[in-house]
Image (cartoon, coloured by chain):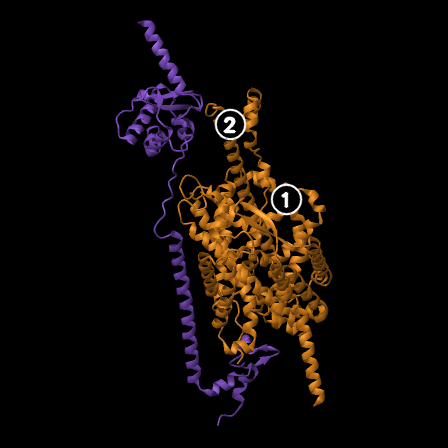
Chain colours: A purple, B orange
Amino acid sequence: MLGVLLLVFSLVALAHAELCRPDAQNAFKVRLSIKTALGDNAYAWDASEEYLFKAMVAFAMRRYSNKETTQISNVLLCNMTERVSFWFVVTDSSKNVTTVPGSEVEAAIRMNRNRINSAFLLTDNTLQFLKISSTLSPPIEPTVPVWLIVFSVVLCLVGAGILFLVLSGIRQRRKNNNESAENGDLEDKCDTPVTTENGIPCDILDLKTGRINGVYTADDERFTPL
Amino acid sequence: MEKSRPLWDNPLQFVFACISYAVGLGNVWRFPYLCQMYGGGGFLIPYIIMLIVEGMPLLFLELAVGQHMRQGSIGAWKIISPYLSGVGIASVVVSFFLSMYYNVINAWAFWYLFHSFQDPLPWASCPLNSNHTGYDEECEKTSSTQYFWYRKTLNISPSIEENGNIQWEQAVCLILAWLLVYLCILRGTESTGKVVYVTASLPYFVLIIYLIRGLTLHGAVNGLIYMFRPKIEQLANPKTWINAATQIFFSLGLGFGSLIAFASYNEPNNNCERHAIIISLINSSTSIFASIVTFSIYGFKATFNYENCISKAILLLTNYFDLEEGALTADNLDSMKDYLTSTYPNEYAALLPQIKNCSLEAELDTAVQGTGLAFIVYSEAIKNMEVSQLYSVLYFIMLLMLGIGSMLGNTAAILTPLTDSKFISTHLSKEMISGIVCFINCIVGLVFTMEAGNYWFDIFNDYAATLSLLLIVLVETIAVCYVYGLKRFEKDLHLMIGHKLNWYWKIMWAFASPVLIISLFVFYLTDYIRTGTLQYQAWDATQGQLVTKDYPSYALAVIGLLVAASTMCIPLGAFIIFIMKRLKRNVSTLE
């Protein structure tokens, strides 16, 4: 009796060893980078963590197929390394000693990737399923691109500035025209020739009003008033 | 009838305007490159020598001419000798070419500025490919910052022959840039004088902030040591001296007519000698200051990439050999590599091609200049800083201020002769002339927003102003010294600045500067002739890097046209005046 049991046991173990080995059919390699992800809060990888992993894979298979047939014992892990990397297969409990097709496992893991990641406090980069490519989430794009908003603001400011300057320039010129028209043509005629003194225009020397020569003003009293 | 000439409100506005014009993008993106290529700290020796021998005298000459003649470039040279009106026209033509392509840089600065308000920055990561399983192919081959520049900003085509469509985003930014320039020059010196307070001083605030931030970055010291370690042997290389002379020459913006235009709005007794010395000193010290900032940024970026490279190598080895996490560190990497080679020789040999040798020197050696430095290298460094949005906004506002400051000078060089001309100013108001000039430049500038636009930009950048300016300044110096007469000019200056001219200036103007410019001119010509066909760098999207290609014949024709259009004005102008005088003499002798 004991001998038969031993034989069966060893056969099962052998079969399992056959099913789960590196590069086996329908086997996937998993790599965890716990220290990279969590730093000081990193947990140690031990048998309990392995149990959790088996449970998560079983959960993923159940969710995917909507059957409640996959058990934790169906998930086999092997070739554990210090890196924390290992291979796993999912066996089919209904059929004898066969593995679930890789495509099903891949689809199941893909569907529940977020749940698996968060169970281990890891991300797609730090919990890697080597043959299963993860769907990267696209960045959130707002409905109106941000740059257009800022652009419109600056455009409106510059446009308003130009309009203001142009309009004030036109208004000032119109005022100048009106003033010179009011002052009459005589002043216009007087203003046209540029008075220069020694080659320098008078308006720079501020000589529009003429210069009073102090020698003559004092002699006003010499003349007898009429 | 003749209105008094508009003046600067005070001499400070004039100094700020000249600084704002001279301190431009070249100080930020060309000088650090030259420093790195030609001897590090040792490059300062030829740079300062050229500044004293070439920069200050020529700057003083242009400011003095403008202030004395009180006219834009065309009028000023006409007064010196009627045969030299071609020189003024050549200056205006060169300024016109420059303003056509220069504002595109401001458009790019606007584009990056508007995109800096996002979190995360759009050039921080690659976009996803179509089925969301990985990153975009082109972005994977190159880096995300290069991808953002070449694909998202320029949408560059593989060669200059394939023109592509006008990129509406760039076109819109270009229109905004021109509207901003129009706003600043609308009222002439009245508005320009106030704007230059901002455009001259704001870049310095940002540079100081970046200096403090840059020096405190991890790895900045590596860049600074690398830059300032003098390689004295480079002093024997003639290219070092030529590049120092060229950099001083173009950095001050001589020959465009902008300095003449700015000085023409001065009071007649303004001390332009002191201002010339101040402006050239500030320009050069800004270059050195900007290169300190640039090299601390370089050091940060190189150290970051080096450490990334090491981490990638560690990850690769850890994953391949299933070693414990943290077993390999940067320190024990080499010893562990030897251990692995001895323990697993076959596997290691298989892995060897994938492991890149990481070298800090190699990262620092990648010297970049021009738009590559400003938009790729800096944005790469910024994306790795904390609060990157703030630094990005500050940086691109600084680029914008530098660019707008230079544009103000360029447009002043075009507008001052136009508004001085009695024929034009009686028919059109100042605002209309500015508007028309801006509009024409904007329409032509749309060429640079096409997919091949960057290649045309490089053509204009490399060839529109280089040879012509050398010739213009040479003719200017010879004209003032020998045609107008150095003694006569000395007397005019004595009247203006109030004291006798120092002998140093006279020697520089009469002998040293013309000799220097002639040698630069000869060097450029021989360089062009020796290289034979001209080539350009084209972006290859499939490889994710730049490749060298030959210019097609019509591009070469455009280059020839650019150079000829400005240089031919000088002899043509003299010739036309000669013919006109002959005709007038014939007419008067007939009567």
The residue marked by circle 2 belongs to what chain?
B
Q: Residue at x 71, y 54 (%)?
A: B530
Which quarter of the rendered picture does the C terminus of chain B lie within?
bottom right
Q: Distance between the residues labelled 2 and 1?
A: 37 Å
Q: Is residue B338 above or below residue B530?
A: above
Label 2 vs 1, first from the N-terminus: 1
Label 2 neighbour load within 10 Å: few <14, some 14-19, many 20+: many
Residue B138 position, x and y percent, is 49, 44
- Residue B316 seen in the current view: yes
Please tell me the numbered disc located at residue B317.
2
Residue B90 position, x and y percent, is 62, 67
Q: Is mark 2 on a helix, strand or loop?
A: helix
Inspect the image, locate mark 2, and give the three-letter code of the amino acid beneath it. Answer: Leu
B112, B480: nearer the viewer: B112
Q: Is residue B279 above or below residue A120?
A: below
Q: Is mark 1 on a helix, strand or loop?
A: helix
The answer to which image quadrant residue B68 occupies is bottom right
Label 1 neighbour load within 10 Å: few <14, some 14-19, many 20+: many
Q: Is residue B283 above or below residue B227?
A: below
Q: Mark 1 points at which residue?
A: B40
Q: Which residue is drawn at 73% across and 59% down?
A: B515
Q: Residue at x 52, y 40 (%)?
A: B300
Residue B590 position, x and y percent, is 71, 89
Q: Residue at x 54, y 27 (%)?
A: B331
Inspect the image, locate mark 1, and give the three-letter code of the amino acid beneath it. Answer: Gly
